[in-house]
């Protein structure tokens, strides 16, 4: 079993009222967490940076765009205008990943200055 850390934070898009809504919680102990529900931030999937719990990527399915927060979800800004993401992730080295029907893309430069590059592009793979 793992050891509880006082700084443990978890999050996800949970279904509320017919849509996915962002939830972020601080783990209090082995059986309880203090949840913050953000009903104004609809989401399909979210990623929490493993090195910084205040850094989130959220796929907003209703607007079909990817958004970033650097303050734990209190505010968001668009992430390089990326559209169509179905799943999102952030790894320990700082790479952002998005998966969609078109393929898998990654970005190491961040949402403000980075550039998405293909890891696997289905549109190209089908032609070859």
Image (cartoon, rainbow, N blue to C red):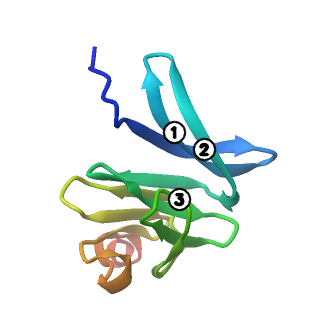
Residue at coordinates 60% horizontally, 55% vertically from top-left?
Answer: 44
Rendered position, 4 above or below 117: above
Quadrant assignment for the N terminus: top left
**Residue 50 image position (x, y, % from top left):** 29, 48
Q: Earlier in the sequence, mark 1 or mark 3?
A: 1
Q: Check if mark 3's residue and mark 2's residue have beta carbons within 8 Å.
A: yes
- Which residue is label 3 attached to? 73
Residue at coordinates 49% horizontally, 54% vertically from top-left?
Answer: 46
Q: Check if mark 1's residue and mark 2's residue have beta carbons within 8 Å.
A: yes
Quarter where residue 10 is shown? top left
Rendered position, 82 above or below 57: below
Q: Earlier in the sequence, mark 3 or mark 2?
A: 2
Identify the secondary structure beneath mark 3.
Answer: loop
Q: How far is mark 1 from mark 3, CA to CA?
A: 11 Å
- Which residue is label 2 attached to? 36
Q: Which mark is residue 25?
A: 1
Q: In this view of the protein, which residue sits in the foreground, 33 or 18? A: 33
Identify the secondary structure beneath mark 2.
Answer: strand
Q: In the figure, is residue 49 to the left or right of 69?
A: left
Residue at coordinates 41% horizontally, 76% vertically from top-left?
Answer: 123
């Amino acid at each position: 079993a793992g050891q509880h850390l006082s700084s443990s934070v978890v999050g996800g898009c949970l279904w509320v009222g017919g849509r996915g809504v962002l939830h972020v919680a601080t783990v209090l102990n082995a059986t309880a967490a203090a949840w913050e529900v953000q009903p104004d931030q609809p989401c399909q999937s979210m990623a929490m940076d493993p090195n910084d719990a205040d850094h989130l990527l959220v796929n907003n399915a209703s607007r079909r765009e990817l958004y970033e927060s650097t303050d734990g979800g209190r505010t968001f800004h668009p992430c390089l205008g990326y559209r169509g993401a179905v799943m999102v992730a952030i790894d320990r080295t700082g790479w952002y990943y998005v998966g969609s029907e078109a393929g898998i893309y990654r970005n190491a430069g961040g949402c403000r200055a980075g550039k998405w590059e293909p890891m696997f592009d289905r549109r190209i793979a089908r032609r070859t």
